[in-house]
Amino acid sequence: MTRYASECCPPSQTSSEPLRDEDAANAQLARLAKALGHPARVAIIRLLLRRDACICGEIVEELPLAQSTVSQHLKQLKEAGLIRGEVDGPRVCYCVDEGAIALLRALIEGLG
């Protein structure tokens, strides 16, 4: 089931501004990079960004992985704050947290 992101994911509450303290910004970046440390999790983020919609069952259909494996990757992305999910009956619909993605971009740009 696919729904537009605005239907199941309210606006992000994540600040896109990196912390000013360099040590704290390093810790933020390391946490987000760790969450993206597996190709399947990167593929999930790319899929969610391309669709700009909430996706339930289609994630498993798009990836060559078992349901339980995809669920584990979704859990890690959600714990890192990169994605959000909303219960929709027996399913959870996922979308990218735009604020967290903006934060990740800002942290990476701050490396230079």
Image: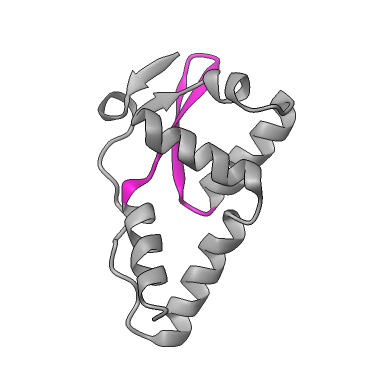
Say if residue 95 shows up in the picture. no
Q: Residue at x 70, y 27 (%)?
A: 64
Main secondary structure found in the magenta portion: strand
Say if residue 58 shows up in the picture. yes
- Image position of 42 (left or right of 110): right
Q: Residue at x 31, y 53 (%)?
A: 99
Quadrant housing the C terminus: bottom left
Q: Residue furthest front?
A: 112
- Please provide the residue range marked out in magenta: 80-98
Q: Position of residue 90 (x, y in %)?
A: 55, 15
Q: Name the colour scheme.
A: one colour
- Residue 42 is inside the magenta segment: no
- Residue 94 is inside the magenta segment: yes
Q: Position of residue 29 (x, y in %)?
A: 49, 69
Q: Is residue 58 above or below residue 41?
A: above
Quadrant housing the N terminus: top left
